[in-house]
Image: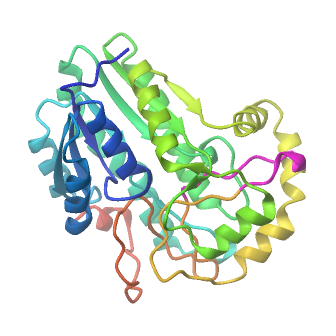
Amino acid sequence: MMELNGKTVVLTGASGGIGSALALEFCAEGAQVIAVGRRPAALEALRQRAAGRPGRLQPLVADINCARDRARIAEVATAPDALIHAAALGSFGLFVNSEAGEREAMFHTNVLAPMALTQALLPALLKRPESRVLAVGSTFGSLAHPGFAAYSASKFALRGFIEALGREHADSGLVAQWIAPRATDTAFNPPNVVALNKALGTHVDAVDEVAAQIVHALRAGTRRRQLGWPEKLFAWLNGAFPTLVDRGLRSALPVVRTHAAVDRRPSLPPKSFAAAPSPAQVTPAFDRRTAPTPTSSVIRPLAEGTAPTPEPRSPAPQSVSELGQC
């Protein structure tokens, strides 16, 4: 069991949702948290909330998609004991309406940027007698769901990276971990997914409970874990008997299409949300980490904090290489 008191934890997506709850949980355990996010005001508010806890929170304003910012994170985190990937992009909508630039942005944030940041911190992590690389995953990383095609693909890719990384360093003190929450209650659930949750009878977990489970899994060195029941069963079924899940999800298609066809943008950018079929449907529950804009498939960060009023949509980057420059 890893003792977190005095350990240095690098946490991305720290300014909202599960990310901010994790930051507070780590500070309660006495960890020194380098809280990475893009919004200074949200990070400062988080620092104030963490005050008085045994650990210490150091805000670091940075964009993990930016190569210079990743280098700066590595400069600040000279002796990390754990790297937690909690930042992500997501989208809810039918794949036929999605856009190539937005899919590339999602893969860059959900897969390529975490890989690049891991590579930058890996030499320092391997110097520690015991270290962790933990990805806050998704049910969709084990079970692809209609309405979340590109997002599911990105989470499958991230899960594959974490699994391979762990196997590459199986003879070291580094443990790579994939911990997948199910639907989680946050302040930024967009109306169409809230409605979908209700229509499908999804159980939604409290964010503090999810954060506590993730921290416990990190301390225990759990390599892979799906949170929640029956989501754990459904994820297993999708690997062992996918045709059963195919049939179950087919019954949910009319509901998914109905909510994917309605543009109900909230006044604040969505952060953490999910939707899931009920157990009676024998369909897997949605994980919370997707961002909907059904008619236009606009994607937004899921783990960011205080959200500004939505800005006018800017043209999507044209290539993954362009996304990495700043």
| Magenta stretch bounds | 276-289
In the picture provided, is 64 more to the left or to the right than 268? left
The reply to whether the magenta stretch includes residue 20 is: no
Q: Determine the residue located farthest toward the top in the rendered image.
A: 171
In the picture provided, is 159 more to the left or to the right than 284? left
> How many numbered tags mark residues here?
0
Relative to 97, say whether 161 is above or below. above
Please report the residue visible at 88 percent of the width from the left and 41 percent of the height from the top.
244
Q: Position of residue 325 (x, y in %)?
A: 23, 65
**What's the magenta bit mostly, secondary-structure-wise?**
loop
The reply to whether the magenta stretch includes residue 281 is: yes
Quadrant location of the N terminus in the rendered image: top left
Quadrant location of the C terminus in the rendered image: bottom left
Q: Is residue 325 among the parts visible in the rendering?
A: yes
Relative to 264, say whether 56 is above or below. above
Q: Position of residue 186 (x, y in %)?
A: 51, 60
Q: Position of residue 255 (x, y in %)?
A: 82, 69
